[in-house]
Image (cartoon, rainbow, N blue to C red):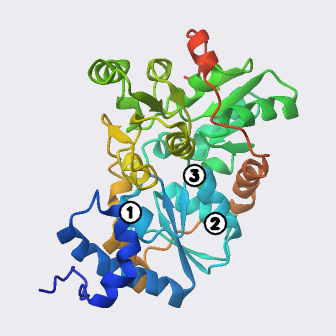
Amino acid sequence: MKTRATTPFAFTPEVEAATAPIYEKLKTKVSPLEWQLQAPLIFEINRLKKDMNAVILAHNYMTPDIFHGVGDYVGDSLGLAREAARCDAQIIVQGGVHFMAETSKILAPEKTVLIPDLRAGCSLASSITGADVRLIKQRYPGVPVVTYVNTTADVKAETDICCTSANAVQVVEWAAKEWGTDRVILIPDQFLAKNVARQTDIKIIAWAGACEVHERFDADDIAEVRAAYPGAVVLAHPECPPDVIAASDFTGSTTAMGDFVTKSGAKQVVLITECSMSDNVTADAPGVEFLRPCNLCPHMKRITLQGIYDSLVKHQYEVTVDPAIIPRAALAVQRMIDMPPTTTPARYDMVKARHHVDVEMIS
């Protein structure tokens, strides 16, 4: 019996054969019935990409059908930014949230950047504006501003250099040296700022923003997992509160966590981050048991296969950035991209040794 998705495409023998290698990766997460709905869309999206000279940049928090099924480039914010800048495609479909699409447009203003759902925002990005940053710079003249890449284009335009969770310590220390100062403004994620402060002697000035996914974790979550699974290895994202970082075995970006899982030999792993991360790593680490807790990002989950298909077919929704601010925002992002590769994941030994590092909060 033929099973049809909401688009008029059937699960034909051609579709089944073409998508079989993808299903091999997804079969532990997707039932055969679900696959008959997803495979025709995956097949059509991959066909459309070739016809339209388009690529899909898929963040690590995308669902497995997107991440493994249609993503041309997959990874964390830094990796996707680099690909946006150097890919040859004329159309970029952002499998992620709005600030990521803006970053792609900043780095490739001549390309068409589409996002499948305009509602795919970010609590962290919405916590601060360009006007806020201008006021901060007035209050702290001469202090370099390092801005997490999880921010809007107008914020990036007021920034000296961007960073990601993978290279935040490296960027902060570079900025302090370049500006000849012992203080750096690191915005807008307060927890990333506090965790960076535990790894450097640079004084950190922070903003009270937070990721709604990571701020919900606490040390009790980890204690409960350890009580139930004494041998589990706990990996946490740097956007988590410091008590979570201190209770974890390893801290790093989403890419660093994935690399750790595939190379460490750990048999039971807890990824303290967005739920789709473990689903996506499973394909590359079939012998690892992934334990909860995790939290869903409602914004990332607005991006669906159907939305990606509609975005390509209908040429929706195009993301634009004010041409007047692109050069300034591009400078901050490009400085981040041009940083030499770091050996991150950093060893968070200092996190455990320096529990009480003062961070100046902007009020």
Amino acid type, label 1? Lys
Q: Quadrant of the C terminus?
A: top right
At mark 2, the secondary structure is helix
Mark 3 lies on residue: 77
Amino acid type, label 2? Ala
Mark 1 lies on residue: 25
Residue 5: x and y in percent read 21, 79
At mark 1, the secondary structure is helix
302 or 63: nearer the eye? 63
Q: Nearer the viewer, mark 3 or mark 1?
A: 1
Residue 112: x and y in percent read 58, 77
Q: Is residue 159 visible?
A: no
Q: Nearer the viewer, mark 1 or mark 2?
A: 1
Mark 2 lies on residue: 84
On screen, residue 247 versus residue 350, left or right, reads left
Q: Categorize mark 3 by other alpha carbons within 10 Å: few (<14), some (14-19), many (20+).
A: many
- Identify the mark at residue 146; answer none if there is no mark: none
Is 283 situated above or below 83? Answer: above
Residue 32: x and y in percent read 21, 69
Q: Residue at x 50, y 18 (%)?
A: 246
Q: CA distance from mark 3 to mark 1?
A: 23 Å
Q: CA distance from mark 2 to mark 3?
A: 10 Å
